[in-house]
Image (spheres, helix red, strand yellow):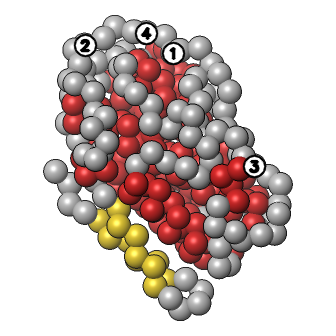
Amino acid sequence: MRKRITVTAVIASGAVITALIVTPSIVFASQNAAAPERGATTHTSAPPTSGQPSAGSNKSGKSGMHQGREKGTGAHKGAAHGAGKGSAGSLSNIASGTVTAEQTAVLTHMAEEEKLAHDLYVAFDEMYDAPVFSRIAGSETKHLDSVQVLLERYDIIDPTAGQMVGVFRTDATQELYDTLLAQGSVSLDAAREAARTVEEMDIADLTAAMDGVTAPDVLAVYGHLRTASKHHLVAFGG
């Protein structure tokens, strides 16, 4: 089991906000949603495409805590439209494998983590005139789609299905989102710092998630998402 990681960010006002990043096993222990260990599967095609959450680009100039929660759903089933290794659009060429019960819990956690990144960047895009948030929010939409393809392949319940922007099933994820949103509402620099926190968390979680995984499609998606998070971290000034 991974150790807890504590991320501390100093915002412009001089206050210190500490967000507790919990391991997937801790996050989903309270949900009792982990699926039983599944056998090998031979699916070779991605599920049909449906809608995607909006990346958001309408600037409101407001810094309200939950302004994004009134805008549509936070996640949808379906394949991504982006190309690249590990993307949903290319998974039809990558074989499935076997996932354990623990790896199933990690997959559900990664879905919520991708949704958190998307929803946070949508909120920041509405607050600030900084195109980087809209651009990377669009990328996070494709990343979530890729994880959703895996959830459907392995018959795993999607924790993001039907959830509005800024709303999460897991208490720990909701608290983290609220903390980072409050931090980023202070200033543009603070928003970039919050975004860097998210990308650093993603990189660490994806690296840990890959350990012990044998399913080729899962490894491909995780590797693709980790590489993308490294690029996002640079884009946010990391």
**Where residue 54 appears, x then y in whole percent?**
72, 41
Q: Which residue is drawn at 31% across and 34% down?
A: 33
Q: Is residue 212 visible?
A: yes
**Amino acid type at image mark 2:** Ala
Evaluate if marks 2 and 1 touch, with contact meaning CB atoms under 8 Å apart. Answer: no
Q: Which of 55 and 35 is in front in this view?
A: 35
Q: Nearer the viewer, residue 7 or 176?
A: 176
Q: Is mark 4 on a helix, strand or loop?
A: loop
> What residue sits right under mark 4 in the picture?
44
Evaluate if marks 4 and 2 touch, with contact meaning CB atoms under 8 Å apart. Answer: no
Q: Residue 56 carries which label?
A: 3
> Dot 3: few (<14), some (14–19), or many (≥20) neighbours within 10 Å?
many
Evaluate if marks 3 and 4 touch, with contact meaning CB atoms under 8 Å apart. Answer: no
**Amino acid type at image mark 4:** Thr
Q: Which of marks 1 and 3 is in front?
A: 3
Q: Distance between the residues labelled 4 and 1?
A: 7 Å
> Which numbered disc, 1 or 3, marks the residue that appears first in the sequence?
1
> Dot 4: few (<14), some (14–19), or many (≥20) neighbours within 10 Å?
some
167 on left or right of 94: right
**Where residue 60 appears, x then y in whole percent?**
82, 63
> What residue sits right under mark 1 in the picture?
46
Q: Which of 218 and 123 is in front in this view?
A: 123
Q: How far apart are marks 3 and 4 (CA)?
A: 33 Å
